[in-house]
Image (cartoon, rainbow, N blue to C red):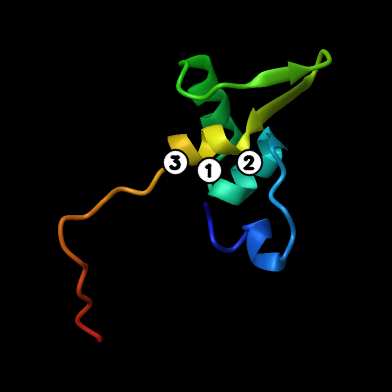
Amino acid sequence: MALIANPALWGQPVPEWLSLQQAALLYGVSVDTLRRRIRHGQLRASRFGQRLIRVRTADLDELFRPIPTVRPIRHSWT
């Protein structure tokens, strides 16, 4: 999850469901990217009423998981 917009870092609980706008802000992607992932079946979403689309935080964490590295990254400035 993006560190800047992570509510857990502010001492707030992370909600189970997020709107597409909230998810885009938290994960640093566009709403169009989330809609595309939903359309292609890569991200599960639920419709609440006729217009509201929500995604589960757990599904977003699974979709945007970190890429493992073989060895630690060494920076030249450290």
Decide which of tag 3 and tag 2 comes sooner along the chain: 2
User: Residue reaching furthest bottom?
Assistant: 78
User: Which residue is under mark 3?
Assistant: 64
User: Residue reaching furthest top?
Assistant: 50
Secondary structure beneath disc 1?
loop
Could you say which quadrant of the image residue 44 lies in?
top right
Asked whether the residues under the numbered discs 3 and 1 touch, taking CB atoms below 8 Å apart as contact, a structural biologist would say: yes
The structure residue drawn at horizontal position 74% and vertical position 59%, both measured from the top left corner, is 12
Query: What is the distance, in whole Å, between disc 3 and disc 1 at their CAs?
Result: 10 Å
Q: Which amino acid type corresponds to the residue marked 1 in the rendered image?
A: Val
Q: Which amino acid type corresponds to the residue marked 2 in the rendered image?
A: Ala
User: Which residue is under mark 1?
Assistant: 29
| 20 or 8: nearer the viewer | 8
- Image depth: mark 2 or mark 1 in front: 2
Could you say which quadrant of the image residue 77 lies in?
bottom left
Could you say which quadrant of the image residue 22 lies in?
top right
Asked whether the residues under the numbered discs 3 and 2 touch, taking CB atoms below 8 Å apart as contact, a structural biologist would say: no
Q: Which amino acid type corresponds to the residue marked 3 in the rendered image?
A: Phe
Asked if residue 68 lies left or right of residue 58, the reply is left
Q: Residues within 10 Å of mark 1 (few under 14, many from 20)?
A: few
The structure residue drawn at horizontal position 72% and vertical position 65%, both measured from the top left corner, is 11
Tell me the quadrant of the picture where the C terminus can be found: bottom left
